[in-house]
Amino acid sequence: MKIEEVIKLARLAHLKVGEDEMESLGRDLSAILAFAERLESANLGDVEPLAHPLDAAQRLRPDEVTEEDRREAFQEIAPQTRDGFYLVPKVID
Amino acid sequence: MLNRSLSDLSRGLRDGDFSSVELTRFFLDRIRSRGGELNAFITVAEEQALESARAADRRLRDGVAQPLTGVPYAHKDLFCTEGVLTTCASRMLHNFVSPYDAAVTEKLKEAGMVMLGKTNMDEFAMGSSNENSFYGAVCNPWDGERVPGGSSGGSAAAVAARLAPCATGTDTGGSIRQPASLCGVTGIKPTYGRVSRYGMVAFASSLDQAGVLAAGADDCALMLQAIAGFDRRDSTSMDEPVPDYTPLPGADIRGLRVGLPREYFGADLDPEIGAVVEQAVGVLRGLGCEVVEVELPAMSLSVPAYYILAPAECSSNLARYDGVRYGHRCEAPASYDDLYTRSRAEGFGAEVKRRILVGTYVLSSGYYDAYYLKAQKARRRIRDDFARAFGQADVLIGPTSPTTAFRLGEKTGDPVTMYLSDVYTIAVNLAGLPAMTVPAGFVGGLPVGMQMIAPHFREQDLFRAGHCYQRETDWHRRMPGAFE
């Protein structure tokens, strides 16, 4: 896998990858994908894809509020909050 | 109190031979004196354990105890526990104290079990050797220079060394069965949807399933009984009745049809391991089982398909770690993008990053059909193979792992070689089936496991077969010499 491709993937996955990691990462990803490509040899043309091993469908429930408000408990473990909001670096100048 | 079954411990508590506080102290002392060398625990919850033990003793005294009330257990560190760290063995969650309990945690609390602590594991359950932990590798109690297997390596090592009488685990591609096999204990991965995934940190949601590890099959039956069942908070939980898992004292397996998949006994299998499993099959034959050969022709597709599907789901599930709401956040982020990408780069280890990137690749536009869709097709093939085999057999049997415990560092340089450690376990997850490994002997002083696979929701057949096998053998009661 080319370095440019690793950079593109890392950007898509929101992962910062250091210059020094690029080459070995590219090598590992190529090896893993080459391994996955063993599926190529199987004749799978007309097989229907399987998403759920028991063929279950998504269960539906009435559209009602079931969660209680636990904002304080959830924000207590956040890295940075103020007045009930999560804080992040400025996005708009 | 050492090396006794859960029903023995339960009886001891009821008869007043010892209290839950005494039993809990006994295991906490073992963890303190012997746990360090194994690195099996990330957190030891001494105070909470003693508090639960006191509550259990009150229940026992008041006559409102359930079968496992007062019995201690070790909890894999990816089940959320209110008030106790849940790290997933990741720097990303090194400071994460969950604001709620996982369904499994809740149920074990209701049963009155006593949580000793949280066990070490491969980071986010990604690994087969427990070497991918931010908290360091776990050692195998049978040989300190070898791996315990993974990802539930801490749970398996803790049970093998009898630092805990039983433990929880999770199994996405073999993460209960492979370490249980390498550490010489019994472990079951139930049917997909049997145990609630609510509050279980997600890795690959169409494959993840919680289960248990203990010395014997009867112990696992008791513990699974406590955690199995429908939960509306998990959208993939199955609303199926939970049968009584504990086999009756006189249970037998006469006439049980045992299928040996040819693909499980091929050229890749170490002949000495094959011989151990065949000997175990001989024991079952002696108990009146009928043995037939079956075929699973798509078996060779399982590991490649898994390493497309699992990373794809992982890349999506792990997108939640953003450095904003909880978990690790980098120092002095320069921008929102910097905050997100650097927190993740610092928080995740090498294997987790590889899987996120592989998953991102196979799901990206232009590659979906070539990888993801093809893997889903292979998945159906594999599941249909099992369905056909279950027309001829009630239980399928083969080895759990192609090798015994390998040396620490032996496979860390090559991800694909490591992935092949799960060659006999992964297909079961793709098909959503229940499977159990039981200790079946030793090769070179290291434990070998026999894997038993059943149709969906037939866990009771595994427990019955395991019970009958373990009535005839004592491999599951053997302890590593250094921990006796």
Image (cartoon, rainbow, N blue to C red):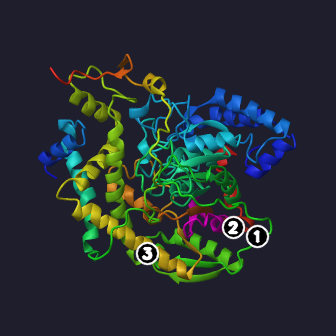
Specify the quadrant of the image occupied by residue B104. Answer: top right
Specify the quadrant of the image occupied by residue B221. Answer: bottom right
Marked residue nearer the N-terminal end (3 or 1):
1
Where's residue A33, x and y in %? Answer: 25, 58
Q: Is residue B163 visible?
A: no
The disc numbered 3 marks a residue on which chain? B
Q: CA distance from mark 2 to mark 1?
A: 7 Å
> Residue at label 2?
B464
Residue found at the very far top of the displayed protein: A83
Q: Is residue B457 magenta?
A: yes
Q: Are the residues flagged by discs 3 and 2 from a single subunit? A: yes
The disc numbered 2 marks a residue on which chain? B
Badge 3 amino acid = Asp
> Residue at label 1?
B251
> Residue at label 3?
B384
Q: Are the residues flagged by discs 2 and 1 from a single subunit? A: yes
User: Is residue B225 shown above or below B453?
Assistant: above
Q: CA distance from mark 3 to mark 1?
A: 31 Å
Q: Which residues are magenta?
A: B441-464
Secondary structure at numbered mark 1: loop
The disc numbered 1 marks a residue on which chain? B
Where's residue A62, x and y in %? Answer: 47, 48
Q: Is residue B208 visible?
A: yes
